[in-house]
Image (cartoon, rainbow, N blue to C red):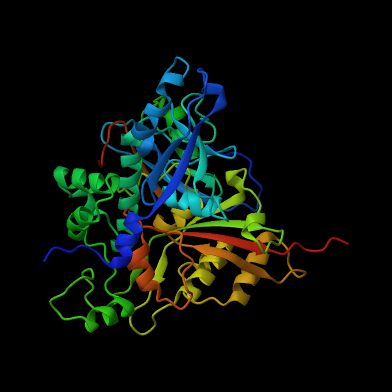
Amino acid sequence: MMDRGTKAQKYVWEGAIPLQIHLHESEVTTLPPPSPALILAPRIGYLPLLVPQIKPFFSSSLPPGVDTVWFEYKGLPLKWYLPTGVLFDILCAKPERPWNLTVHFRGYPGSILTPCESEDNVKWSFINSLKEAAYIINGNCKNIMNMSQSDQVELWNSVVNGNLEAFIRVSSKLKLGIGGDEFSDKLSSLKSPQSATETDNTGLVKTGRIPVRLYVCSIHENFDDLEDAPHIDSWDKISYINRPVDVLGEEKSSTNEDISGAEVGDESRSPSEHGSNTGTAEEVGETLCRQEGSDSLSDKAEIKLLRIQGIKPKLEIPFAWVVNNLINPEHFLHICVYVRVLEPITI
Amino acid sequence: MASEPPSSARKVVVHLRATGDAPILKQAKFKIAGTDKFAKVIDFLRRQLHRETLFVYVNSAFSPNPDELVIDLYTNFGFDGKLVVNYACSMAWG
């Protein structure tokens, strides 16, 4: 029976950010200036893939020259290889709808952004991330390298078009699953065996490593209202950590709380914490403080915000469910975190 | 590539390996600060080989994003105390 994905996966794949895209004023050569383009950008997609839709709004207004398209949010050039949903989750503490972005067709900031000339760059980046994920999960990426040309094309197209069924059809051959999780198993056991609406959860949680990309914005000011969260004007303000998480077997099914604590604790980049599954808020605070260089005076770090696919997951949710349902098509779990770190008092 | 980072910065040993018909470097082992991005390794190779177009891989498997930190790549994919980086003039593992 054709697998159509879990309900949660469908929500994720159908999730989109409404964008209001303005042409940068330096590139407006017509009066009146062109109206902004209103586009729904798939969360799991990438901004450069929207260019064919966007360009018609602005092409008659552009100055002469060759197109080198890039996007910017409040002055920050956007890294094109990050899924749109991730950009939104980390850069907009308070979700802005529509999300106002500026598009440029000239003057590519080569010192800040790696080149992106066409959809091929995005596809290459995607396939390599998928290989990296496969390497983390299986210890090799043979499955990806042995994909037939037509399968590779179909896989990429399913991402470009947001077609979850087509994606599952091809990706299930790649053997990148971590197995079932208790949540989904309990849900599917309530239904009749014939209505297999869940993915191929076998009911066994196999041990393995989950590819994770963690984005941490450390802030020193306190804020209660997301509106007051400090604006991110440089990529230096976001710590990006590429660190897999170990999933233990049935003896210990980790919750979100354990993982998020351990992940943020990993910010200290000490090898001994690699893959750690336990972590209380206290330990997180300690490791963060060591990392920030403040030894004894401050003792608190607080997770102000944690988002996966735009969702603030309840910390009791089994991590395996999060992985099965909230990962991106390239099989990475992207986690966006705002952490408040207390500054030591200077005497 | 042997710049002067602070002595507290952790260094990673990178082993550069030629693939296909790519020229072999006289010196193939280098140390680079873990806090540097993979882009630094790519740029170094480009300069050494006088080639703009290079395909650079880790463990003959995949091409990491140039923004990745060397320390993360080493932690995740290094073995025997080094990070193996393969380079080719044409796409080796497509």
Q: Residue A191 vs residue A271: left or right?
A: left
Which residue is most to the right? A347
In the image, residue A142 above or below residue B87: below
The quadrant of the rendering that contains the C terminus of chain A is bottom right
Q: Nearer the viewer, residue A341 or A97?
A: A97
Q: Which quadrant of the figure has residue B50? A: top left
Q: Residue A117 location, x and y as percent?
A: 38, 30
Residue at the limit of the structure toward the front, as seen here: A32
Furthest toward the top, the residue is A64
Going 61% across and 49% down the picture, which residue do you hit? A237
Q: Residue at x 63, y 55 (%)?
A: A227
Can see residue B24? Answer: no
Residue A154 locus on image (x, y percent): 19, 46
State the residue in front, A64 or A267. A64
Q: Is residue A116 above or below residue A297?
A: above
Q: Quadrant of the N terminus of chain A?
A: bottom left
Q: Is residue A274 above or below residue A19?
A: below
Can you say whether A276 is above or below B18 in the image? below
